[in-house]
Amino acid sequence: MEHDPPKTHKLTALSAQIRNPDRVNVSVDGKYRFSLDISQVADLGVKVGQCVTAAELTELEAESQFGKLYARTLEYCLARPHSVHEVRDYLQRKTLARRYKSRRTGQIKEHSGVDRSVADRVLVRLREKGYVDDEEFARWWVENRNIIKGTSKRKLSSELAAKGVDRILIDRVLAESDRSDLQELTKIIAKKRRRYPDEQKFIAYLARQGFSYDDIKQALQNNDV
């Protein structure tokens, strides 16, 4: 028994997007279907007149999703360092269906969300390229978090844990840091002491910031000298 050959579709046009010249609109059978990054067009060998099966067309549309999501997530990662947990949460939000208002027409539209496998692939690529690295993120966080205002190591540890960083890694990065709680206390005392005329209330405030009682007493004595 002979089987009919699979139905094919023709790529009929490639054109640079007006808003984003780094992306190329791809028309299939005479109608716009999806867009690709310029690099994807070259890597995938996409050409006008090319015939593709339905399965191949689905793969190209998945590549379109990947390219868009990768570019957006890369911008997110370049704005400041992020932990793997933060980026995974960001990508998770992109997989959710949502309603939005079109800027051009004002109409309410539905967005089905990105396929989970595409989001997972984006995270893998970002980690491979070194754009997402928990150790680099932890070092950046410790070196930059409230560097002027002061922050206890205990608070830094808690913040990093909330960002999904492994406890062993947190302890190692904090141990290697030049920041000390006594130095951090000096910063806070200089900024906050006038607000707390009652020393016991001030000590209680500093303790809530994650500093030990012994360090607080020593820092207060050093600043009274």
Image (cartoon, rainbow, N blue to C red):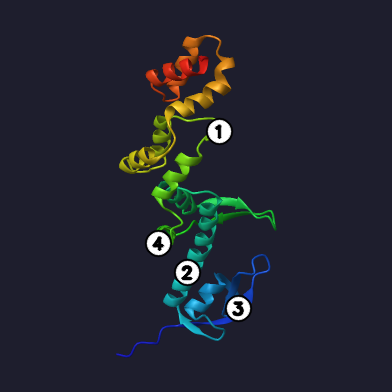
Give the number of the mark in front: 2 or 4: 4
Q: Is residue 5 above or below residue 162?
A: below
Label 3 and label 4: CA atoms lie apart by: 30 Å
Question: Which residue lies under the disc numbered 3?
Answer: 14
Task: Give the x, y percent position of residue 178.
Answer: 43, 37
Give the number of the mark in front: 1 or 4: 1
Q: Image quadrant of residue 174?
A: top left
Mark number for residue 128? Answer: 4
- Name the residue rendered at 55%, 17% in the picture: 193
Of the residues shown, which amino acid type is indicated by label 4? Answer: Glu
Circle 4 Cα neighbour tier, 10 Å, few/some/many (<14 / 14–19 / ≥20): few
The answer, for residue 167, to whether it is visible in the render is yes
Q: Tag 4 or tag 2, which sits nearer the N-term? A: 2
- Name the residue rendered at 51%, 57% in the picture: 74
Of the residues shown, which amino acid type is indicated by label 2? Answer: Glu
Label 1 and label 3: CA atoms lie apart by: 52 Å
Question: Which residue lies under the disc numbered 2?
Answer: 63
Of the residues shown, which amino acid type is indicated by label 1? Answer: Ile
The answer, for residue 84, to whether it is visible in the render is no
Of the residues shown, which amino acid type is indicated by label 3? Answer: Leu
Mark number for residue 148? Answer: 1
Task: Give the x, y percent position of residue 1.
Answer: 29, 90
Label 2 and label 1: CA atoms lie apart by: 44 Å
Task: Give the x, y percent position of residue 223.
Answer: 51, 18
Judged left or right of residue 130, residue 191 is right
